[in-house]
């Protein structure tokens, strides 16, 4: 809990996964384990191919201090935890927490450097979704909720990209869509995914690729 | 006995083309995303042996015809993925393939001094064939810490031909990178094309 709270105080956004295979970094709370038990635990993780992450422990077994594990001693100290974060994510794209979703639709003036966010994507589908969302924002104003619906495998990347684009001045806020301002949308109506701005051959192929790789 | 199906007409609905200088990774990119084994026309290259300094990967072959892969969809439709030879002497093939491609990814080295010259040559070739409107420029092998500088330099050049054309750094070995480049080429608005 203390570790999670400290992470929450950092400006980066964290997503916790219950499935070990879905996580980029592992956190092992070994604060209640004896050194021998911790050594055994780490050996087991290493056999499974997982030895990248942080171990919270009161004692560090000398034979286990190797590989990709970082050991943080409990009780935790904020500067040590933040130092570890900065070491692990030196080129994190943006202070994601700085992004505040606007009520107005947003539009891109030029292409952002999309590949900068590939580390935040969920596979091939995320890569296609993020590029397609940018294409939509270049072609017409898009609402933030619609963009999120169009990017289920690239949500973190989308937020990071929008925050960057806003900072760089290549994201503009457009006037609200008239029908929504005047309340013509029924309150219980579910938002629909953003449709491609044209039915051209290019967008048709993107739609098919999304079906293929999702 | 297996029954052969009869196919009348053309199943290829659209095509995506990869272009760029010799050895940049067009064939590799094609292999990364094709649903079928890539039909390959690589042969030993005297050019590569003579200019090994240009080939940090040690590549000693080159594509002499074209590379061909496919995306196959459940409804039977096929999208052709084509790697176009990089050398000037194959420009007749560019004439045949580029104008009819739905998306074109131009692969450019990010770690060579003449990157901008190389890029300009390709952009001019694409512009002559009315093919810049469907373009994404993928820069490979960008040195660590120089990504912004290299991409900005290429972007500044590309905007002279197409103000909205996307420029990204990409690894042709990574399917997600290659798919991203293709998607960007497909979705960039056409209306922004300069006269």
Image (tube, coloured by chain):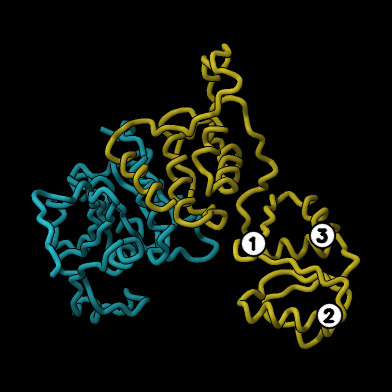
Check the picture and name the quadrant holding the N terminus of chain B. Answer: bottom left
Q: Nearer the viewer, mark 1 or mark 3?
A: 1
Of callouts 3 and 2, the N-terminal one: 3
Of callouts 1 and 2, the N-terminal one: 1
Of callouts 1 and 3, the N-terminal one: 3
Separation of marks 1 and 3 at Cα, in angstroms: 19 Å
Location of residue B176 in the rendering, given as x and y in whole percent from the top left corner: 43, 58
Which quadrant of the structure image shows residue A190? Answer: top right
Q: Are marks 1 and 3 on the same chain?
A: yes
Left or right: A78, with A168 as reference point: right
Location of residue B109 in the rendering, given as x and y in whole percent from the top left corner: 37, 63
Residue at 48% from the left image edge and 49% from the top image edge? A114
Chain for colour cyan: B
Q: Which mark is residue A60?
A: 2
Left or right: B150, with A32 as reference point: left
According to the rendering, which colour does chain A have?
yellow
Q: Are marks 1 and 2 on the same chain?
A: yes
Chain of the residue that carries numbered disc 3 in the rendered image:
A
What secondary structure is found at the residue carrying circle 3?
helix
Q: Mark 1 sits on what residue?
A: A19
In the rendered image of this protein, does residue A189 appear above or below residue B116? Answer: above
Q: Which mark is residue A3?
A: 3
Residue at 35% from the left image edge and 64% from the top image edge? B32
Chain of the residue that carries numbered disc 2 in the rendered image:
A
């Amino acid at each position: 809990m203390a570790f999670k709270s400290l992470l929450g105080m950092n400006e980066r956004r964290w997503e916790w996964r219950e499935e070990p295979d879905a996580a980029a970094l592992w956190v092992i709370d070994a604060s209640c384990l004896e050194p021998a038990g911790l050594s055994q635990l780490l050996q087991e993780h290493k056999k499974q191919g997982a030895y990248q992450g942080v171990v919270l422990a009161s004692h560090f077994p000398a034979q286990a201090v190797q590989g990709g594990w970082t050991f943080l001693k409990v009780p935790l100290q904020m500067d040590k935890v933040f130092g570890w974060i900065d070491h692990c994510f030196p080129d994190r794209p943006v202070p994601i927490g700085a992004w505040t979703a606007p009520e107005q639709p947003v539009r891109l003036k030029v292409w952002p450097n999309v590949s900068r966010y590939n580390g935040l994507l969920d596979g091939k589908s995320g890569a296609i979704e993020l590029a397609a969302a940018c294409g939509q924002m270049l072609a017409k104003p898009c609402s933030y909720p619609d963009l999120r619906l169009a990017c289920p495998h690239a949500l973190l990347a989308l937020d990071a990209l929008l925050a960057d684009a806003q900072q760089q001045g290549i994201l503009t806020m457009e006037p609200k869509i008239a029908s929504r301002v005047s309340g013509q949308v029924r309150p219980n109506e579910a938002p629909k995914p953003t449709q491609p701005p044209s039915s051209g051959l290019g967008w048709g192929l993107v739609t098919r690729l999304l079906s293929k790789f999702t | 006995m297996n029954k052969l199906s009869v196919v009348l007409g053309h199943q290829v609905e659209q095509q995506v083309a990869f272009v760029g200088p010799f050895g940049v990774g067009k064939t590799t990119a094609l292999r990364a995303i094709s649903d079928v084994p890539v039909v390959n026309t690589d042969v030993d290259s005297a050019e590569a042996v003579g200019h090994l300094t240009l080939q940090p990967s040690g590549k000693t072959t080159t594509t002499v015809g074209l590379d061909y892969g496919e995306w196959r969809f459940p409804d039977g439709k096929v999208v052709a993925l084509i790697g176009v030879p990089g050398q000037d002497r194959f420009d007749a093939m560019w004439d045949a393939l580029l104008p009819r491609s739905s998306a074109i990814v131009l692969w450019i080295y990010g770690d060579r001094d003449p990157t901008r010259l190389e890029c300009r040559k390709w952009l001019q070739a694409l512009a002559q064939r009315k093919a810049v409107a469907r373009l994404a420029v993928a820069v490979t092998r960008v040195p660590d810490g120089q990504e912004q500088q290299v991409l900005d330099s290429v972007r500044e050049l590309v905007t002279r031909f197409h103000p909205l054309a996307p420029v990204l750094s990409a690894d042709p070995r990574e399917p997600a990178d290659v798919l991203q480049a293709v998607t960007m080429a497909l979705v960039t608005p056409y209306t922004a094309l300069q006269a």
